[in-house]
Amino acid sequence: MTTLRRSLPQCEFIKQRKNLLRICGMALKSVVDKFCFNGVLDDTDPDVRNLLVILENVLMHRCKQKGPSSWFSDEVTSYWPCIVASCSKVRRSCVPIVTGMGGRHLTGLAMGRIFLQMALMERRLSEYLSELVGPESTDLLRKAYEPEAFLLKDEGAALPHMCLGLNAIDFSFCPKGENLDYQYIPCIDFTPYLDFTPCAQAELDDEHEQAVLSGAAMPSTPTEDSPDENWRAKFQALYVKYRELGQQKSYAEDMLTLKQARIEKLEFDLAAMQGDSETTKALHGKEINQLQLVVAELQAELQSVGRDRSTSDRRGLELFLTGLSRNGKFHEAIALKNMPDEPEEQERSLSFVTVDGVSLDDEFERSPYGSAMNGSAEGGMDALERVMTGGVPPDHYAADGNSLQPLTGSITQPDDDQQ
């Protein structure tokens, strides 16, 4: 009998935890289904209110009492201290905001209810619950809860994963405008879930999701045999296929438009590059033609300068030799190279006048040979010998004193005939 009394509470606690876990899953399923068709949910919806009550019962399950309430206060021990100690570590936690809203006139139960609403609006309830039942908070939970509590068992570890679906739902609450400071734990309403039948739309969506996940074809067999249900199921199947095809068609059109825009841009860039290439090629051709003309002009100028210089050199040589032959000083000028320098005699010998009274000194100075002599017969002879010998040193012809006589005779012969 004693063993039965000791084991009975444990069995009851296990049933309580299983019932809370099952009813919590059903409440979450109903809220998710309603959000798919109604959009934003608020506290006026009975399923939302029942979900908040279930979460509060889960958090209050087997919470330790700090002591008997006094005659001037009937405050009930709440889970709010555990929330503050564990969930304050979460990044950008809403716990400081709830604490600031509560002040001193709100109890722990009221601030815990505000926390649940804020967590649902932030879509972070599963994150807060994961921190609450995590290994770092085990010692804290053992101090605040009895050993048979929901949060200390496996059911508590499964609760955050069940609440992940709430992260995709938009909730709207106004905690300041509600009276949340009542000092009792509300009772869970089981009646909506005892005869709960999901709508056909939700069932078809679930079947379609399961078919997509499993990779199989969507079953077209209706759940009921009535004609209306058959037609509705067929219509729903066709609508789902049409919607998928429409999405694929819009995606393909968007991709086609994007590819066409890229192709047009590439064609425009290619045309621009081809135009630039042709322009550059034409400019290079013009530059090549101009350079060729410049080269031709420089070659012509070089040839002209060479011819003019050779003609000038020949005329200067003829003028020099003619002047020497007319004054009879050709042989004397050659002999002067080996004589000592006599400035006065050299000046007299070089100061001669040709026919018509024109002095040859100016001609010598203007010619390259006269400028080389600078008034010296020796310099003139050196220049003459360089021209006649093609740059060979004069000593090469020192043995032959009559080497220039034939050239002199050929130049002076016409003058002798005229005389």
Image (spheres, rainbow, N blue to C red):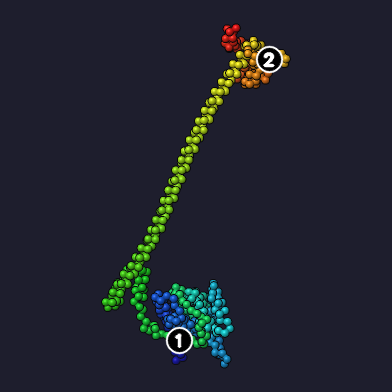
Asked if residue 146 shows in the view, the reply is no
Across and down, in percent, residue 331 comes to 64, 11
Instruction: State left or right for residue 137 relative to residue 17.
Output: right
Q: Please state which of residues 120 and 79 is positioned toward the viewer in this rendering.
A: 120
Across and down, in percent, residue 349 comes to 68, 13
Q: Please state which of residues 310 and 74 is positioned toward the viewer in this rendering.
A: 310
Q: Which residue lies furthest to the front in this view?
A: 356
Residue wearing tag 2: 351
Across and down, in percent, residue 96 comes to 56, 77
Instruction: State left or right for residue 98 relative to residue 339.
Output: left
Pointer 2 and pointer 1: residues touching (CB < 8 Å)?
no
Residue at 34%, 65% in the rendered image: 245
Residue type, mark 2 in image = Ser
Q: In which quarter of the image is residue 360?
A: top right
Residue wearing tag 1: 187
Residue at 54%, 72% in the rendered image: 91
The quarter in which the N terminus is drawn is: bottom left
